[in-house]
Image (cartoon, rainbow, N blue to C red):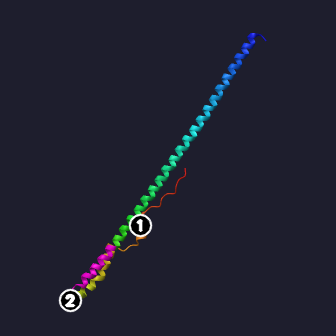
């Protein structure tokens, strides 16, 4: 072979090595970019799931607070009913005998009126009705 041909072959080999090196670098960079994107996607999904869990915890806490308030209000109302009837009984017992018969006759109607205005209620049922069931978790 002529020196010129050998020189050309050497240049072609060098160019081929340079192209092969660039191709390897390009593949490595693509691989690194794909890994970085996968990690970023995993972090985004993880953060999204964390936000969903936090929202579910807060919704459950709010529902529990609603239940507790409704239950407490119901207990207060039942107490007011009992206290009002007890106060009525105490007042009737202090009446003079001449008014006692008339008071006893109107007592039943008065208790019906108290029960209509401030009824005794099943507090567990009232509290349960005050909260809406939470929707099923969406695992998207």
Q: Is residue 96 above or below residue 139?
A: below
Nearer-the-camera pick, 96 or 104: 96
Q: Are marks 1 and 2 in contact (CB under 8 Å)?
A: no
**Residue 104 at x, y = what percent?**
27, 85
Res. 70 image quadrant: bottom left
User: Badge 1, how many Cα within 10 Å: few under 14, some, many 20+?
Assistant: some
* Residue located 60% across and 37% down the image: 34
User: Badge 2, how many Cα within 10 Å: few under 14, some, many 20+?
Assistant: few
**Residue 91 at x, y = what percent?**
24, 81
Magenta highlight range: 79-95
**Looking at this rendering, what residue extends furthest in the right direction?**
1
**Residue 18 located left or right of residue 129:** right
Q: Is residue 28 magenta?
A: no
**Residue 79 located left or right of residue 58:** left
Disc nearer the start of the sequence (1/2): 2
* Distance between mark 1 and mark 2 Cα atoms: 46 Å
* Residue located 44% across and 55% down the image: 58
Where's the N terminus, which quadrant? top right
Q: Is residue 24 above or below residue 131?
A: above
Q: Is residue 87 magenta?
A: yes
Q: Secondary structure at mark 1?
A: helix
Res. 84 image quadrant: bottom left
**Residue 78 at x, y = what percent?**
35, 73
**Residue 46 at x, y = what percent?**
53, 47
Q: Which residue is mark 2?
A: 98
The overriding secondary structure of the stretch rendered in magenta is helix
* Residue located 52% across and 49% down the image: 49
Q: Which residue is mark 1?
A: 127
* Residue located 45% across and 59% down the image: 60
Q: Secondary structure at mark 2?
A: helix
């Amino acid at each position: 072979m002529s020196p010129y041909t050998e020189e050309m072959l050497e240049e072609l080999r060098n160019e081929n090595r340079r192209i092969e090196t660039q191709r390897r670098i390009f593949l490595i960079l693509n691989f690194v970019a794909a890994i970085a994107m996968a990690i970023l996607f995993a972090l985004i999904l993880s953060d999204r799931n964390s936000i969903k869990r936090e929202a579910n915890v807060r919704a459950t806490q709010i529902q529990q607070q609603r239940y507790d308030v409704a239950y407490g209000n119901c207990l207060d109302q039942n107490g007011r009913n009992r206290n009002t009837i007890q106060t009525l009984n105490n007042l009737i017992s202090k009446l003079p005998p001449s008014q006692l018969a008339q008071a006893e006759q109107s007592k039943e109607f008065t208790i019906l009126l108290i029960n209509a205005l401030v009824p005794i209620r099943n507090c567990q049922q009232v509290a349960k009705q005050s909260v809406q069931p939470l929707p099923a978790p969406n695992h998207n």
